[in-house]
Amino acid sequence: MPSPRPGCTPSLSPRSNRSPLRAWQIRALAEMGHWEGGPFLVSAAPGAGKTRPALEFARRQLAAGTATAVVVACPTAPLTRQWARAAHELGLDLAPDADSPAPPAGFHGVAVTYARVAKAPLRWARSLPRRTLVIADEAHHLGEELTWGVTFARAFTESHRWLLLSGTPFRSDATPIPGVSYDADGLAEPDVSYSYAEAVADAVCRPVCFVAYDGSLSWRSGDDVIESSFETVLSTREASRRYRTAISTDLPDGLRRILGEADAKLRAIRRDGHRDAAGLVVAADSEHARRIAKLLREATGRMPLVVLHAEARAAAKLAAFTAATDPWIVAVNMVSEGVDIPRLRVGVYATAAKTPLIFRQIVGRFVRTRPTRPTHSPRAPEPSWLYIPADPILRDHAATIEQELRGSVRRPGDGDGLESEEREERRETERSPAPEFVPLSADVAPQMTLFGAPGPAPAPTAAAARWASALAGAAPNRDEPSDDPNPPGARSVPAFERRAQLRDERHRLVSEVRRRDGTSHREINAWLNRKLGIASVEKATLSELEQSVELLVGKLSQLSRRR
């Protein structure tokens, strides 16, 4: 890694208004304190705050000189920006959606997508600074025999430490995750584990109440008309069609009725004090989402927000909804990792995907809590409610999700048949319905199922207590309680956002200078770079960008005086 220019060494000063670490985060940091090399897996429930201990550890390693740079790898570009903003709160500056592991001048590291690494893993390997700490967020997206997993391992093979983070440390295709250890039964062995049940017991996450709906469903299958509830055992094909009938938007007493029930629940929650509580419907595809939106408009008198993964502004629409008070959102493929909408309290599961991984990711959207002032005896948060078809697979997921989130790597021949049904169902749902299948009627009603009572959280160890003392006042997590007296708009701007603002301002001023004196963009930029002693604007520090703006403003003042 090249030595930084004088005055360019980034500081590690966290913000002063930092909230205490949670007990499980202290425990995780205590365990990391004994970690000398190799991979380290942190498995924690969605919404529990995995980002915080990872960044705390990275800051400590950089301050000690044990690490010289940090690379955070994520599934999506919006997640890289979330990591950069969270890091800024701790005094770390990460360049998001980077195209190289070498941090820009004035930055401590980069955040990058797995897809970007996969495009040039050997170039990333060659450019990797020595003693780089690699953090793999949502590590279950990696697979040893799949592109992202293979290229991740190739790009970061020279890094002696991988910090793997996941709320679901397994894959639906049973592919091993690089760096994860498995026991004799094929179960992942996390170095630190924090289950959903523990998170609910600690009032870190909301409990989720499942409302499974069932009743009489009928559909045409070829020349036959079949009528069944979810209690009846059917062939794989007919079970798939029964499920599709349950989530069909064409039947007045089917999904339409459940949407009305869900809206009534949401209205009650908003009346009871959570005034901006919101509901989410997870649809099967884009057309399905639009039809569901029409049903919600009929039921509520208001058109819900529809977010489709193919839309250019999908991430921006999600961010706007997070801060708004609108009651309903309908989404497709936009509700997995990194979507933090703490006001979500009611959901309707209407997607065809039923794997354990996807189910847990969707449930994870409803467990997050709004940041509040911490107390010594936190009051248990009110539950969220998720309406699901009473399909046996989904009911089994709902019955076991509060258990410790540990997954297995199935051995060849150990399949239980559910994956083949999932693939068949997904194929049939994603294409136009075959002529021989027609949903005819549905008469469904909700029935309650709840999570079991969570067990007690583990007591902090002596090592954890020492960490609590050493890290008193650590920086806030984006999804944990905070004493910050300043509203979000009053917080300082992260370095990557300030850098983008300064470059935009520089570009605007260069264009204005060109308009006034006829000099080309290239000539003006070359003049600025000579003045600052830099090779290009890409290599400029924040201070140098500020100086370039000042030079351009001075240049424009001179041009104005000449007139």
Image (cartoon, rainbow, N blue to C red):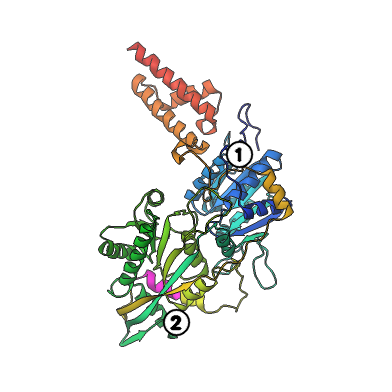
Q: Which residue is mark 2?
A: 236
User: Gap between marks 1 and 2, in whole Å?
Assistant: 52 Å
- In the image, residue 160 sits, relative to residue 184, either above or below, namely above
Based on the displayed image, in which of its 4 quarters is residue 334 positioned?
bottom left
Above or below: residue 67 compared with residue 450: above
Q: Tell whether position 444 is magenta.
A: no
Residue 127 shows in this picture: no
The numbered dot on residue 263 is none
Q: Image quadrant of residue 272?
A: bottom left
Q: What is the x, y in percent for residue 393?
A: 48, 76
Image position, residue 384 (x, y; %): 45, 63
Q: Which mark is residue 108?
A: 1
**Label 1 or label 2, whichever comes before in sequence order:** 1
Could you tell me what secondary structure mostly forms the magenta stretch? helix
Q: Residue at x 34, y 86 (%)?
A: 226
Q: Which residue of the protein is positioned furthest toward the bottom in this rendering?
A: 224
Give the residues in magenta: 423-432
Whether residue 338 is visible, yes or no, is yes
Q: 373 or 22, which lies in front? A: 373
User: Vertical placement of 486 versus 313: above or below?
Assistant: above
Specify the quadrant of the image occupied by residue 279: bottom left
- Amino acid type of the residue tagged 1 in the rendering: His
Quarter placement of the N terminus: top right
- Check disc 2: other Cα within 10 Å, few if <14, some if 14-19, many if 20+: some
Comparing 32 with 106, the one in front is 32
